[in-house]
Amino acid sequence: MNRTRLLRELFDEFFRAQNRSLKLYDDIVQFISTRRVVSKTQGDGTTVIDVTKYKKVVQLLRKGYPPEYITSKAYFYGYSFWVKPGVYIPNPFTEKLVDYVLTEARRVLAQGQPVTILDIGTGSGAVALSVVKELGEGGLRRVEVIATDKSAQAIEVARYNARRLGVAGSVAFYVADVAFIEGNAILPRYQNVIIASNKPYLPKDVFTRLPRHVKLQGKLALLRSRDFDSKFKAYVNLLRNKGYRVTTVVETFRNRKPVSAKVVVRRYNVDYEA
């Protein structure tokens, strides 16, 4: 089959599904491509398309299956992350959350004070690991970074991403219910605490209408939970009562229409309301 024609069809199908990233498209092409040796003496090679893979990928794209799950790769804040079904695909909007966390962390550090950064519901580890990479080795000397998730699968993925990015020793990962392990709260090392969270925010009526391929990202990551909200609030207030200075940086849906509008909210050391 003609490679040019196949790639044109793949390109059309990829962008018909409202995928916008050329990097993801290149990943798809690489995923379905193989290398065939033409001349053993000269070592020349020709890139060809694995037609079986091609047909499977096109079928998945037509169904709306995320390309990130096809290639097991997602891009966030300029870094590449491994993802798989059941683990939330990092959203470009969430990069704003990283910006806020970095701004706040650098403000505290500039005052000569150490800081703990806690990423609740870390998923693939995108937020915590992007913060670590941006702060750099020098910036981490007075920074503690903790990442939690209720999903053991997500923590496994996050730890793998930490190794891939060369920062495995810079983040403490915990399988935890918000920030509680068997009812015991994780207590930060430093008094200045920045809590970041891309909260599970979809109302039930919205979640139930989601296409099946979107739900692959996991109910824990998507469906808003009163249990999560109450434990998040309880944890923030517990830290405040113990004398910690807490800043929360939370990504969630707006409380007004349209329901799809997202917002990053920053709150300083005050009683937290979910």
Image (spheres, grey):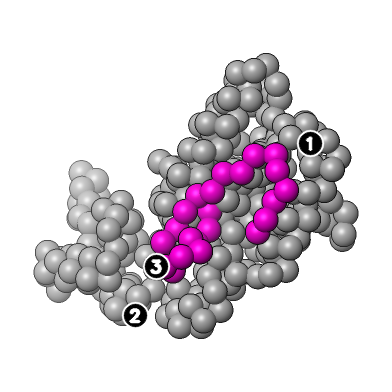
Q: Which residue is mark 2?
A: 63
Write the residue at 28% across / 75% down.
Answer: 58
Label 2 SS: loop
Split into 4 quadrants, where in the image is the N terminus? bottom left
Split into 4 quadrants, where in the image is the C terminus? bottom right
* Category of crowding for the residue at label 3, using alpha-carbon neighbours closer than 10 angstroms: few (below 14), some (14–19), many (at least 20): few
The verdict on residue 224 being magenta is no
Q: Which residue is mark 3?
A: 258
Q: Which residue is mark 1?
A: 244
Tell me where the magenta segment starts and ends, as one range: 251-274
- Tell me the CA gap for discs 3 and 2: 26 Å
Write the residue at 42% across / 52% down.
Answer: 93
Label 1 SS: loop
Write the residue at 51% across / 74% down.
Answer: 216
Q: Is residue 170 left or right of residue 6?
A: right
Q: Is residue 5 left or right of residue 46?
A: left
Q: Amino acid at mark 3?
A: Pro
